[in-house]
Amino acid sequence: MKLDDYLNANGISGADFADRIGVNAATVYRIRTGRVFPHQKTIRAIIAATEGAVTVNDLLLSQQQPIRKKENL
């Protein structure tokens, strides 16, 4: 489950979740929108805080960008 989906499904704000895992709200926002990949310590905190509902694989998959086709010039 993606972190964003977990937070929405459980009615948890990014700021509240940030407090639970020991980071700032901006960091949670960047993680949940796929803009950054969390440090190992933060990954462990996310997994623990979500009781395994969000896995490292979920975090990896949220980082993947869609493949763009080259346009003919």
Image (cartoon, rainbow, N blue to C red):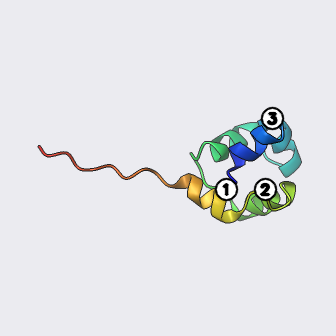
In this orientation, which residue lies closer to the viewer: 70 or 44? 70
Q: Residues within 10 Å of mark 1 (few under 14, many from 20)?
A: some
Could you tell me which quadrant the C terminus lies in? top left
Badge 3 or badge 2: first in the primary sequence = 3
Which residue sits at x=78%, y=58%? 53
The mark found on residue 38 in the picture is 1
Q: Residues within 10 Å of mark 3 (few under 14, many from 20)?
A: some
The mark found on residue 30 in the picture is none
Q: Are marks 3 and 2 in contact (CB under 8 Å)?
A: no
In the shown orientation, is residue 54 left or right of residue 71?
Answer: right
In the shown orientation, is residue 8 left or right of residue 16?
Answer: left
Q: Which residue is mark 3?
A: 13
Residue type of the residue flagged with mark 1:
Pro
Q: Which quadrant holds residue 71?
A: top left
Q: Are marks 1 and 2 in contact (CB under 8 Å)?
A: yes
Residue type of the residue flagged with mark 2:
Ile
Badge 1 or badge 3: first in the primary sequence = 3
| Figure check: 45 above or below 8 | below
Residue type of the residue flagged with mark 3:
Ser
Badge 1 or badge 2: first in the primary sequence = 1
Which residue sits at x=86%, y=59%? 51
In this orientation, which residue lies closer to the viewer: 65 or 8? 8
In space, the residues marked 1 and 3 are separated at their CA atoms by: 18 Å
Q: Which residue is mark 2?
A: 46
